[in-house]
Image (cartoon, grey):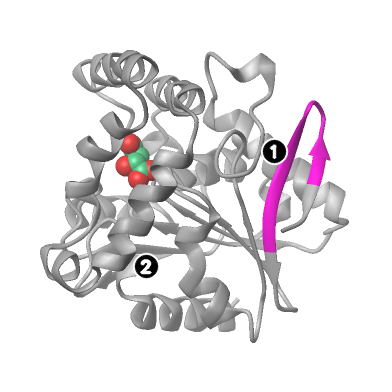
Amino acid sequence: MPTVSLNSFKLHFVEQGQGTPLVCLHGFPLNHAMWKEQLAGLSYCYRVIAPDLQGFGQSELATSNSERLTMEQLADDVNALLDVLGITEPIVLCGLSMGGYVAWQFAKKYPSRLKGLIQCDTRAIADTPEGVANRHRLAGLVLENGAEVVSTAMLPNLFAAITSERQQAAISQMRDIIHANSPRTIAAALRGMAERPDVRAWLPQCDVPSLLICGIDDKISTVTEMQEMARSMPRANLVVVPEAGHMAPLENPAVVNAAIVEFIKQL
Ligand code: MLT
């Protein structure tokens, strides 16, 4: 797995295929492996690049971000990765959930680098005050007791009931990925997500062609919420994925990959 040095830390990523760069940003608190079905199923026609975001997987956490890892910082990392890889052509950026929060920040700050935006199972709204308090409480618990606290809290909400029955191996892989992340990174990302900006008022200005994807049983970023996002964006379409929850690209890759191919074909 290649590594690049970005300012003060090393970032790992996987890269497969050739063609339009399709950069995939993972959710919290996972790593690039959640995109395994897109790496396998889309690299025949795209250059699929899936980084471990700063601090996650095999990427290091810069000392300056050890308290708080903001979504803007993670977007800056993606920009720096493209520079290091010498990618100057516009990319298709695809984020899931936390990766989607990062993708909004990237789209706001680096719009000229984007050919298309794919937002999977993510939100535009900021956390409520109660949500912020919960994130800070969870950050404290993770630092005290380890990453198991967060896998126990999150795993029941990631997969649809139907895929939970069928995809025990994928669930246990996600559990292992969560446990392999450092409590410090998990806590820093929780604090960063807690202060992420509400981007709903900006959505009407996001004029990059966009595909929104949502698992029909997503309990974290619901279909209703993503429908509202799609309605606010001038150039967005929503695809609702059957037999999927919050991890739609992993739970139902056939439908998600077909939607991505169709979207990129029209760009
Ligand atoms: C994720 O899947 O990245 C998380 O659900 C994001 C969040 O906690 O808001």
The answer to whether 222 appears left or right of 19 in the picture is left
| Above-or-below relation of 54 to 224 | above
Q: Amino acid at mark 2?
A: Leu
Q: Which residue is mark 1?
A: 77
What kind of element bears circle 1? helix
**Which residue is nearer to you in this view: 260 or 163?**
163
Q: Is mark 1 within 8 Å of ligand 1?
A: no
Residue in front for this viewpoint, 121 or 264? 121
Where is residue 173? Give x, y as percent: 37, 58
- Between residue 234 and residue 30, name the one nearer to us: 30
- Residue plotted at (52% across, 82% down): 41
Which residues make up the magenta segment?
Answer: 4-14
Please report whichever mark, 1 or 2, sits nearer to the chain's N-terminal start: 1
Q: Residue at x 69, y 38 (%)?
A: 77
Image location (x, y in percent) of residue 61 = 64, 28
Element under disc 2: helix
Establish if 10 lies above or below 115: above
Q: Is mark 2 within 8 Å of ligand 1?
A: no
**Residue 238: in sight, yes or no?**
no
Residue at figure coordinates x 75%, y 37% from the top left: 10
Q: Say which residue appears at 20% left-offset and 57% top-offset.
A: 223
Q: If the image is split into quadrants, where does the C terminus sit?
A: bottom right
